[in-house]
């Protein structure tokens, strides 16, 4: 598939790009080459190929929630720089 200078100019205008004449020529050639290469995919027989959204199979790696023990309040607060009897004390963040 060939792309024209007019189409490159139109797309650059939509993208609000100011292209020089040399750039328009260069992009016209490059985009035409890319589209020609991609057209080769139409030559492949894909009738027996299942559509995929990922190259590799995607698995859910989440684990089940399980109740487990936690650290005692006293041990958790033991090394706190500032605390009350039950809580960590932190600097005020919101006025």
Image: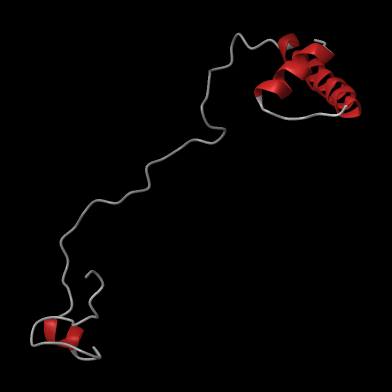
**How far from the left and from the top, in percent, is residue 27?**
83, 25
Viewport quadrant of the N terminus: top right
**How far from the left and from the top, in percent, is residue 46?**
64, 12
Give the image's coloring scheme: secondary structure
Whether residue 3 is visible, yes or no, is no
Label total for image: 0
Note whether 41 is above or below 93 in the view shown.
above
Q: Residue at x 19, y 91 (%)?
A: 78
**How far from the left and from the top, in percent, is residue 47?**
60, 8
Whether residue 8 is visible, yes or no, is yes
Rendered image quadrant of residue 89: bottom left
Name the outermost residue toward the left. Answer: 85
Q: Residue at x 85, y 24 (%)?
A: 24
Viewport quadrant of the C terminus: bottom left
Q: Looking at this view, is 14 or 59 the one in front? A: 14
In the picture, measured across the screen, residue 83 lies left or right of residue 1, that is left
Q: Looking at this view, is 78 or 57 the one in front? A: 78
Q: Looking at this view, is 56 or 9 the one in front? A: 9
**How far from the left and from the top, in percent, is residue 15?**
66, 27
Rendered image quadrant of residue 23: top right
Q: Looking at this view, is 37 or 82 the one in front? A: 82
In the picture, measured across the screen, residue 62 lies left or right of residue 26, that is left
């Amino acid at each position: 598939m060939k792309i024209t200078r007019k189409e490159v100019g139109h797309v650059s205008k939509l993208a609000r790009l100011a292209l020089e004449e040399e750039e328009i020529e260069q992009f016209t050639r490059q985009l035409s080459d890319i589209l020609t290469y991609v057209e080769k995919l139409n030559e492949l027989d894909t009738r027996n190929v299942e559509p995929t959204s990922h190259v590799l199979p995607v698995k859910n790696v989440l684990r089940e929630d399980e109740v487990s023990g936690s650290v005692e309040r006293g041990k958790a607060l033991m090394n706190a720089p500032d605390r009350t009897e039950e809580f960590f004390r932190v600097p005020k963040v919101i006025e």
